[in-house]
Amino acid sequence: MNPPPQAAPSYGKLVDTYKKAVATAASVTAYAVLARGVARELLPHDLRAAVTWGASLLRARLEPRPAERRTVVVRRFDERRGLNCVVESNALYDDAHAYLATRLDPRTMRRCCLSGKGPSKVMSMERGQSMDDVFEGVRFTWASVVSGDGRHESADSLELSFDAEHTDLALGTYVPFISAEVTQARRRERKLKIFMNESTSWRGISHHHPATFDTLAMEPAVKQAVLADLDRFLKRKDYYRRIGKAWKRGYLLFGSPGTGKSSLVTAMANYLRFNLYDLDLSEVSHNSILQRLLIGMPNKSILVIEDIDCCFNAASREDGKERKAALTKDGQADVDNDTEDCASTPPPSITVSGLLNFIDGLWSTSGEERVIIFTTNYKDRLDPALLRPGRMDMHVYMGYCCWEAFKTLARNYFLIDDHLLFPEIEELLAKVEVTPAEVSEMLLRDEDAGVALHGLMEFLTEKEQGLRDAGKA
Ligand SMILES: Nc1ncnc2c1ncn2[C@@H]1O[C@H](COP(=O)(O)OP(=O)(O)OP(=O)(O)O)[C@@H](O)[C@H]1O
């Protein structure tokens, strides 16, 4: 059964309720006016003033006060007054300008600048505008300030404002972070070149070799060690200055032909974004020319001398082509095996001690942030002066293709991390010595992963059989 319909309130009742509400409001107002009048009559003026003051004080305490702000001015040009007034561009201004371009959100800016050529466009803050950047949860405000009549951009500056309580964060962390970020970005964007010596000077061509640490097939622990060493080197400008040593680092890469020494050199250049200076000592006729070439190298560069054993081993000059040797796993020579020979050697006037003394002396003091790399297939044939502690900071052994290195190559060539044939290949790689170059060559033979891996397996099985026949397996 439906409930009986409720009777609608009568018009008379509504009018009564309204009248009661109006009467109550009127009495409350009357009481408030009366109480105020009584307070005014009964409370002395001073007491009332004290109450008002106390209330305003309480309000001020409870209300959040605007934080104190600090502003740091970064001028576009620094002017140092003295006997000679020197005006220099301010590197921090350039860094901040470049950094802000990467943080700028055009949707939040009333006006901004757009520049660039082709598809690469760069946005930046328009003069007179400001923007916020949040770092570690703190808001920093940047303003591009136009000085004077606004016609001379040289007088412009950037102003960084922040709450006073974040001063340490701003100057101790945020500003250094900006410089580090910009340095990294500039490094990444640097176009690389490889230079080769031609008589007394360097000739450079673009360097687009794609080898990187990601594509490099080598023992993961060794790869990590090299990467960590490079990172440390890049960060240690102040450290080298403090200990009074030139900011340079030497690497000796050794291993059998085809183990990836040249590939590692390229990966290092790509990682550091340093230009390569490939020095062919057989082209250098005299020590003075060698010195001129080395002094002509700028900062942030890598000097490479390949097959250094050929360059300075007196024995290699004497027996030249007859010499046959290969490396065993620990880098020592196995005189029975066939290997490549040294193609050319420098004239006798160029000596290892001459080169090393020059590198440790004038070369070190005439520039910084430089890397020197020697490669050799035969570490045991090197002049002991080269192996002396402190000469080459890091010795890197490029070994035969291990399982991890193979997986890198499989990923490079076929974008795969697993395959039915992998277990067998892993077993075979543990038994035979093949170079990454040999494995790469097998993988390149077919576009189909299965076919190429099958070919590699046959190749490895043949090698294993060869070892068995020779009684070595
Ligand atoms: N470790 C590796 N990782 C990736 N690819 C490699 C590696 N080693 C060799 N390769 C491949 O083999 C080719 C030759 O290798 P690379 O020239 O780097 O060896 P190398 O040790 O410098 O040899 P050499 O002593 O004969 O100069 C490379 O271009 C690359 O395709």
Image (cartoon, grey):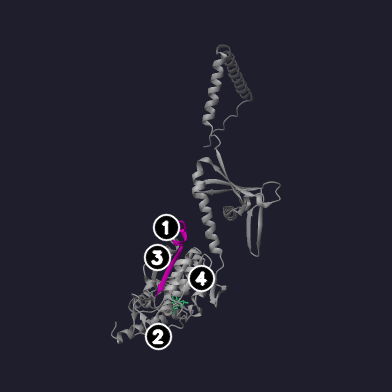
Q: Earlier in the sequence, mark 1 or mark 4?
A: 1
Q: Residue 466 colored magenta?
A: no
Query: The residue tagged with tag 2: helix, strand or loop?
Result: helix
Q: Position of residue 152 (x, y in %)?
A: 69, 51
Between residue 251 and residue 3, name the one nearer to us: 251
- Residue that label 3 marks: 225
Residue under the image location 51 percent in, 53 percent down: 177
Residue under the image location 40 percent in, 78 percent down: 377
Range of residues picked out in magenta:
233-254
Badge 2 crowding class, 10 Å Cα cut-off, few under 14, some 14 to 19, many 20 or more, is few
Up the image or down, 313 lies above or below 99; here it is: below
The answer for how far apart the CA atoms under marks 4 and 2 are is: 28 Å
- Residue that label 2 marks: 318
Up the image or down, 46 lies above or below 463; here it is: above
Direction left: furthest residue = 471
Q: In the rendered image, which quarter is residue 331 located in? A: bottom left
Between residue 100 and residue 173, name the one nearer to us: 173
Q: Are marks 4 and 2 in contact (CB under 8 Å)?
A: no
Q: Position of residue 365 (x, y in %)?
A: 48, 63
Q: Earlier in the sequence, mark 1 or mark 2?
A: 1
Q: Residue 250 colored magenta?
A: yes
Q: Earlier in the sequence, mark 4 or mark 2?
A: 4
The answer for how far apart the CA atoms under marks 1 and 3 are is: 23 Å
Between residue 151 and residue 37, name the one nearer to us: 151
Disc ID at residue 243: 1
Query: The residue tagged with tag 1: helix, strand or loop?
Result: helix
Disc ID at residue 294: 4
Does 423 sit left or right of 98 as displayed? left
Q: Earlier in the sequence, mark 3 or mark 2?
A: 3
